[in-house]
């Protein structure tokens, strides 16, 4: 069973993720802040992390950096959840090592298929291609914007 860790300081967002991912047969772990999210990731080894960027205290960028620096969690793919749709923020998430991002507000029904597709591709060894495609998308958007 796919195990997803949702790290977000907003309870309604965590609930939205939980309901939709569990409906698709995934196990959902929750953390309301960065430090507890790091503890959950290290202790429970999720298959993927959905990580809010804007959190008080330890923000999503710093949580991601710590996850990627820790050998226990460095291989867990990170999908950023961000209310900030600026190119700079999206690019920063990918630069840090995230594999994707979802802009809030998002359609919760899109989450499970996104997670499933992502994990299938990573299982096939396509993590770097995924990030490359996302960066290319951003570049194309910046050029047309």
Image: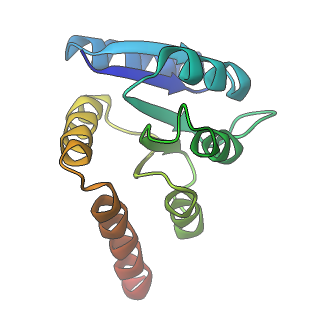
Report the side of 62 relative to 50 (left or right).
Answer: right
**Is 20 left or right of 40, judged from the image as shown?**
left
Between 95 and 59, the residue placed more toward the observer is 95
Q: Residue at x 22, y 42 (%)?
A: 123
Task: Compare residues 83 and 67 and report the one nearer the observer.
Answer: 67
Depth order, front residue of 109/57:
57
Residue 42: horizontal and vertical position, in percent?
58, 22
- Which residue in the rendered view is the most extreme toward the bottom? 143
- Residue 93 is drawn in which quadrant? bottom right
* Side of 97 relative to 18 (left or right): right
Is residue 9 visible in this depiction of the protein?
no
| Image coloring type | rainbow
Tally the numbered discs: 0
How far from the left and from the top, in percent, is residue 37? 62, 23
Residue 116 pos. (x, y %): 21, 34
Residue closest to the far right: 57
Left or right? Give the position of 1 relative to 39. left
- In this rendering, the answer to whether 71 lies above or below 97 is above
Check the image and report above or below for 91 versus 127.
below
- The quarter of the picture where the C terminus appears is bottom left
Going 28% across and 20% down the picture, which residue do you hit?
2
Which residue is at 58% across, 45% downward? 68
Compared with 95, 61 (above or below) is above
Q: Position of residue 15 (x, y in %)?
A: 45, 14
Quadrant where the image shows the N terminus = top left
Q: Residue at x 25, y 36 (%)?
A: 110
In the rendered image, is residue 124 in sight?
A: yes
């Amino acid at each position: 069973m796919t195990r997803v860790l949702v790290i977000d300081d907003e309870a309604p967002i965590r609930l939205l993720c939980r309901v939709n991912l569990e409906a698709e047969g995934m196990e959902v772990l929750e953390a309301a802040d960065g430090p507890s999210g790091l503890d959950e990731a290290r202790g429970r080894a999720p298959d993927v992390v959905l990580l809010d960027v804007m959190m008080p205290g330890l923000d999503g960028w710093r949580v991601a950096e710590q996850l990627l620096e820790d050998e226990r969690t460095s291989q867990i793919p990170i999908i950023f959840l961000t209310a900030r749709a600026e190119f700079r923020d999206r690019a920063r998430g990918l630069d840090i090592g995230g594999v994707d991002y979802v802009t809030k507000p998002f359609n919760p029904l899109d989450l499970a298929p996104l997670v499933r597709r992502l994990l299938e591709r990573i299982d096939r060894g396509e993590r770097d291609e995924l990030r490359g495609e996302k960066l290319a998308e951003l570049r194309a958007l910046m050029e047309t914007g």
